[in-house]
Amino acid sequence: MNPILQVINTKDFKKLWFIGTTGMAMRWIETIALGFYVYSITKDEFLVGIMFFFRMAPMLLFGAFIGVISDQYNKKSILKVTLFITSIIYFLLSVSAYFGTLNYIQICSGAFVAGLAWSFDFPIRRSMLSEIVNKELYSSAIALDMASSNISRIIGPIIAGVVLLRVDLFPIYMFGSFLFFIAFITCSKITEPPKKINNSKSLSLLKDDLFEGIKYIFKSNLLITVLVVTIIMNSFVFTYQTQLTVLVFQNLSNSPVILGILLGIEGLGATIATLLIANYPIKNNLPVFLIGSYIFAFCILVFTYTHSIFIALSLMLIGGIGMAGFGTMQSILIISSADRKIRGRVLGILAITIGTQPLGAFLLGYFSREFGSINAVRISVVFAILTLIIITFVQFKKKLTNKIIY
């Protein structure tokens, strides 16, 4: 049977897939909506960067401990509570926006809650996915999950761009509240058998579990490589999204629709690539992971120089393909390399490396104010490419040395 059909027919996969799609849809809608809105009312690149710092900080602050908790407690219950609380917060923000009392502090607070929800979703839901599918279907399952994220990146930013013609966040927040509530109902229907809760775990024992996960990672050259590259990409390349509104305004157009279409095209390229990976599983994942990183970084670097919408769209399409190679293989490499009993902790530590993005966003926002967004993004991406070259050289030198020895 086709691997995609096998995964889709796996019990509860479609429910977990839908929950992930709702969360990622709002993430990409907010990437456009919040960046555009904050820049429109402040005209300050640094404040845009700070807002995204709050959006991404929870992954850095709590990702690892959430991973530890996911290995010890009932994943379904944690996910349900997270989705319900997030739905309520979005509803309150929509009320504030409707009555015209929404301010910058509230936006940052809402962004922090959304980031916290993503921090719970990443290690918990991904770990649940790996538990319901057979090991030989890991790559197809993760690729399909990434495909839903990328489909959201096609539709979400375009929707946000159209809605923001009115420069109003009320429909954005209300839609988010609705999506997360539907996800909460869907999560309630998952038939995952409850895991015995171990209430005897103290904070110090949970800390020991975390260190066990860290020691496990340092025994694997592959896991270290994946995590280091993840830090580089999230800290110095993906942070371009925090200044995307400014880049588009200065180089291409001041229309939020164009802004949404650009991210949508990037999502289209990523969707095509992830569906191909899902249908044709790749055995040697690391080269695809590294090549995808290079492709995306080069596309963003060239993007900062172009004033042509056609070229910009082409770069985003190709960049999306590269992002799919990076993002899909990242999770596949982690899940396939880690033992099931420690997988949540390893995914939690992966969440920390992804969570370094707010530090990069903060620095990029500061340097954008000092030197301009375009120059700041260029310097950041060039640094990332040079670092990737060093990592690639070290990685393949080790492989060559091992071949000579054996």
Image (spheres, helix red, strand yellow):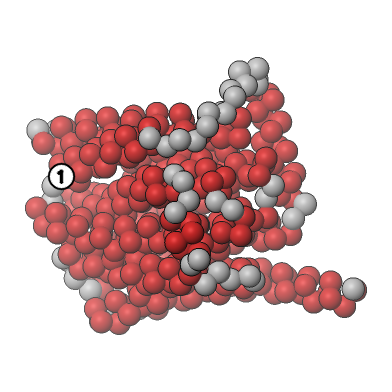
Image quadrant where residue 94 sits: top left
Q: Is residue 273 above or below residue 344?
A: below
Q: Amino acid at mark 1?
A: Pro
Expressed as whole percent of the image width and height from the top left, the position of residue 380 reads: 48, 65
Q: Quadrant of the C terminus?
A: bottom right
Describe residue 141's horizontal placement relative to residue 185 as left or right.
right
Q: Secondary structure at mark 1?
A: helix
Most extreme residue toward the top, as rendered? 200
Q: Residues within 10 Å of mark 1 (few under 14, many from 20)?
A: some
Q: Is residue 379 above or below residue 164?
A: below
Most extreme residue toward the right, as rendered? 405
Expressed as whole percent of the image width and height from the top left, the position of residue 356 reads: 52, 50
Residue that badge 1 annotates: 171
Q: What residue is at 55 percent from the left and 69 percent from the top?
A: 281
Between residue 234 and residue 81, name the one nearer to us.
81
Q: What residue is at 53 percent from the left and 28 percent from the top?
A: 194
Say if residue 266 shows up in the picture: no
Expressed as whole percent of the image width and height from the top left, the position of residue 309 reads: 24, 78
Between residue 78 and residue 15, name the one nearer to us.
15
Describe residue 309's horizontal placement relative to residue 351 as left or right.
left
Image quadrant where residue 66 sits: top right
Q: What residue is at 19 percent from the left and 57 percent from the top?
A: 159
Between residue 272 and residue 232, name the one nearer to us.
272
Q: What residue is at 67 percent from the left and 50 percent from the top?
A: 338
Q: How many marks?
A: 1
